[in-house]
Amino acid sequence: MSVTGPEQASNGDGPVGDRPPAPVFGIPASALERFDAVVLDPTTAERNGDQPAPRPVAYVRTRLLVPGLTDAQLADAVAALERLGEQLQFTPRVLASAVRDLAVELGYDDRLGASTHSAVELVPLDERTGPPLDAWTVLQRARRELGEKVAGWGLDHVLMSAGTLDGVGYMGGVGYMGGVGYMGGVGYMGGVGSPGTASGRAPVALSAEPPRRSAERSPVVAVLDTGLGKHPWFDGSPLVERDPRIDGVPIGLRFPPADDPEGSGVTVDLVNGSLDALAGHGTFVAGVIRQHCPDARLVVVPVMYGDGAAEEHDVIEALNALALYHWSALDGRTDDPPLDVVNLSLGYYHETPAAVQNETALLHILRALADDGVAVVAAAGNGATTEYFWPAALTSEPQPAVPVTSVGATNPGDTSVAVFSNTGSWVTRYEPGVAVVSTMPVTLDGSSRGAVAVAARGGSPARSTADPDRYVTGFGMWSGTSFASPVCVGRITAALAAHKTPADRESRVEQAREALNTALGGTS
């Protein structure tokens, strides 16, 4: 599903009334089905008064995100939704959460509740008739009837990877790729895939030893992505945590072997056996970080599926758990070291850009982490636009104690911005993001084959063109702001590794800010 935005006011990079080039935001049908998600239609979406038409975004059809964590913190929101439910024939139900229960057990429930959101499911009544229940309609009714009481309520958005696609790039139209029904491309279209962009994922022949450590300290990087596949650089490494937990509660999703995008890489197109469009994405990101900082300790947090999609609530739950992980470490309650950096190579465009600060749940928990000394680094997106891409565009908001960094992409060997990269005053850094070489799971081997295959005959050896989706060498080439972001992460962690581990929160904040200045050339 590919969608473009209606005319809207500028995000702030031009005069009021000007509009940045509209990105085309592609969501695969597999993600819409998985999350029971729909795309907001600007022409039919319910509006209040003279409210401008919203952007078309993908969101979970019957779920809202509201501020708070505990029953007491959510009581007013639930009561308000119950009153609305009498009109619209639904009943609200706060989703169960092992992370919420753990926060209460550890005594961090008030602290986390002040910094995060919870998911409330809108369950249609059996006797309900008429159009399907829709979270946007409920949200608009709540705003109209309750006003400021619903500040902070928002949709549960679908986020997408900021990595480009398997040889196809961003198509700008509707089409099928490799036999799989990814309509309009998976990810962001409109500018990527032009001649010379080297946008496709492809194997490369490379033999490279793991980068050698050079410092005693190992800064901790949480990589929220598709996971981490099998690769000699990471297998058995003491600097890799593949199954992070806090008091036994998993941080992030856990994919069964058959659904692991970093294992077989074939979880969507089981009929034809094509690799998932974003299979290997997390391993590739991890390899970029390792190249720039061999001393980094990677905490692998799966949140994204093989088609490149992630549900906002899943990302928030993972960040909630990371906050507990971080706070417990700072308070000396675990043997694990605290977090230093979070990498987010994914995001989305918001339906009402002017109201993002109050309505975007994802930003609140990121601010809380940044206020406690964690450097948050996010990809700027591949829409070839100045339109805010969240959470990277958190840089446009009042900054937490450690400023957020948004990273766009440049071309190989020069400082020119890649044609697909988002730009704007909110992008704080540009790093190489075209034709990047990094690690890929050695297990990935999809059904595609070389275009030419000639059997041995008459003394001539067998010949063929390269297998386009066999990554037995463990390395590949890819492009996207997804891979510019971890370059910046590597630079920050390398700067941190040169210093002793700070003893308290204030020292962590100061050291993180100094590392940002070093990595970004004094721009933070």
Image: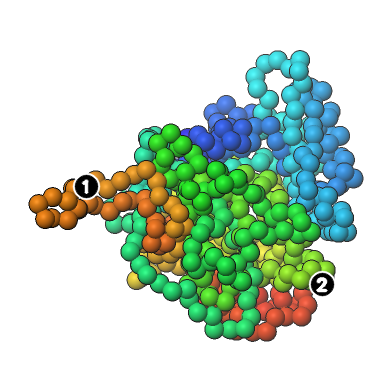
The vertical placement of 23 against 459, above or below, is above
**Circle 2 sits in a helix, a strand or a loop, which is it?**
loop
- Please tell me which residue is depicted at 49% across the width and 55% down the height of the picture: 281
- Density class for disc 2 (Cα within 10 Å; few <14, some 14-19, many ≥20) is few
* Residue 392 visible, this orientation: no
**Circle 1 sits in a helix, a strand or a loop, which is it?**
strand
Mark drawn on residue 144: none
Q: Amino acid at mark 1?
A: Ala
- Please tell me which residue is depicted at 41% across the width and 42% down the height of the picture: 274
Give the x, y percent position of residue 111. Answer: 83, 58
- Please tell me which residue is depicted at 90% across the width and 45% down the height of the picture: 72
Q: Amino acid at mark 2?
A: Gly
Give the x, y percent position of residue 357. Answer: 68, 52
CB atoms of marks 2 and 1 within 8 Å = no
Image quadrant holding the C terminus, namely bottom right
The vertical placement of 332 against 10, above or below, is below
Mark-to-mark CA distance, 2 and 1: 60 Å
The vertical placement of 215 against 66, above or below, is below
Name the N-terminal-most of marks 2 and 1.
Answer: 2
Question: Seen in the image, is 398 located left or right of residue 523?
Answer: right
Question: Seen in the image, is 461 located left or right of residue 444?
Answer: left
Residue sitting nearer the eye, 281 or 79: 281
Residue sitting nearer the eye, 225 or 245: 245
Instruction: Give the labeled residue for mark 1.
Output: 453
The vertical placement of 517 against 300, above or below, is below
Discs 2/1, front: 1
Instruction: Give the labeled residue for mark 2.
Output: 332
Question: Seen in the image, is 310 located left or right of residue 90?
Answer: left
Outermost left residue: 458
